[in-house]
Amino acid sequence: MIHTFEMFMPVNDHDIQHFFSIYGVNLSKYQYIRAAVKQLNKELKLSFPAYAITLIWCEANVDWYLQLKVDAIKILGRGEIVDEDYDLIESNIRKFLVQHFGHSDYFDFHTLTRIDYRLDVKVPNQKDRELLFHLLEKYTYKYRYKEKIKWGKDEDGNPIKYDTSQYHKNKSIELVIYSKEDERVAKGETIQSYDENVVRYELRLKNNHLNSMKRTDKGISRPKLLKTYFSSKLQKEYMEKHVLPIVHKGDYFKITEVDKIIENSQFSKRKKGSLRNFLVMISKGCIDTPKKHMSKPTYRQYLHDLGSIGINPVLIPKNRTDYPNFMKNPFQI
């Protein structure tokens, strides 16, 4: 259900100083707090791999705030997380606070600033995973202001192409689809049993979005609390709204298989021909290509029609003999 999340909480000056001293970091020796936090995290990770401090700041030289990043999967040691696990997660965070501050009261005043929802699906065949990311190249470059990102930078600042991942992002929400095994290998990390053959669909709700959801004028007024967002029902709603319109319903086929399905459908002869032409346009360009040749309502209707008969609008290339004629869409909610 979830992967990582971030929250901040107020911490008094004495406890902040004590926190750093536990790990042998003398704050007075650092000109910038970020450098001290970086050193703190190096030591912290050795004992608490599920935790990281992303930021510590002081307001009006009186109150300190500590921003904590938590990996729920590492806490539980498993990939499957359900609503009933909330108490285990909260208990673990409180134990972390007690070990460092002597009490867990700070959690009572936490503010959630980010949460990453995820859907992990097993794609055992490596060739199928390769095919999936090849097909993702055809998906939209922009949806709900989220732009597709295909290039990033490595640790040395050099350009790097994302071959086994797909990014769609804006200032409020990010969607990342990636091979968990390949990510582990790229980072030089151990592949855990719950990572094997996994393709992860991860939806990151950032602070801007969480702030907008707490506003009363939007009729939602959702508090920025971990318990509020620790919900499989809410996760499903977000996935349907922000992921499904990008990856679409229906399984993947080559055109020869699609022809059979369309021919056996209940659509009129004219509609059958229109749907096939629609798919050909996407194959020759991308999923946005037909928008240049038809109205938005017609475009949406064709996508709906294809989904109703189980066809994903992005086809498996017919000239790739190394690819199968059919692949089930791993994104199922």
Image (spheres, rainbow, N blue to C red):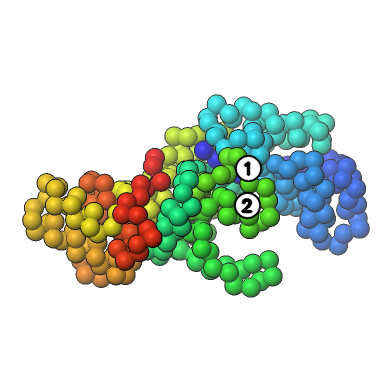
Label 1 packing within 10 angstroms: few (<14), some (14-19), many (20+): few
- Give me the residue at 33% from left, 59% from top: 316
Comes first in the chain, label 2 or label 1: 2
Q: 293 or 192: which is nearer to us?
A: 192
**Which mark is on residue 130?**
none
Residue that mark 1 sits on: 192
Q: CA distance from mark 2 to mark 1?
A: 9 Å
Q: Residue furthest left?
A: 269
Question: Which image quarter holds the C terminus?
Answer: top left
Q: 152 or 284: which is nearer to us?
A: 284
- Give me the residue at 59% from left, 30% from top: 86
Q: Residue furthest front?
A: 321
Q: 82 or 285: which is nearer to us?
A: 285
- Give me the residue at 91% from left, 58% from top: 29
Q: Amino acid at mark 2?
A: Arg
* Camera sees residue 72: no
Residue that mark 2 sits on: 184
Q: How many marks?
A: 2
Please indicate whether residue 204 sits to the left or right of residue 141 in the image: right
Q: Position of residue 46 (x, y in %)?
A: 80, 44
Q: Amino acid at mark 1?
A: Gln
Q: Position of residue 119 (x, y in %)?
A: 48, 43
Q: Position of residue 233 (x, y in %)?
A: 44, 34
- In the figure, 209 relative to 237: above or below? below
Q: 286 or 325: which is nearer to us?
A: 325
Give SS at disc 2: helix
* Camera sees residue 53: yes
Please indicate whether residue 68 sits to the left or right of residue 79 in the image: right
- Give me the residue at 42% from left, 57% from top: 131
Question: Circles 2 and 1: CB distance less than 8 Å?
Answer: yes
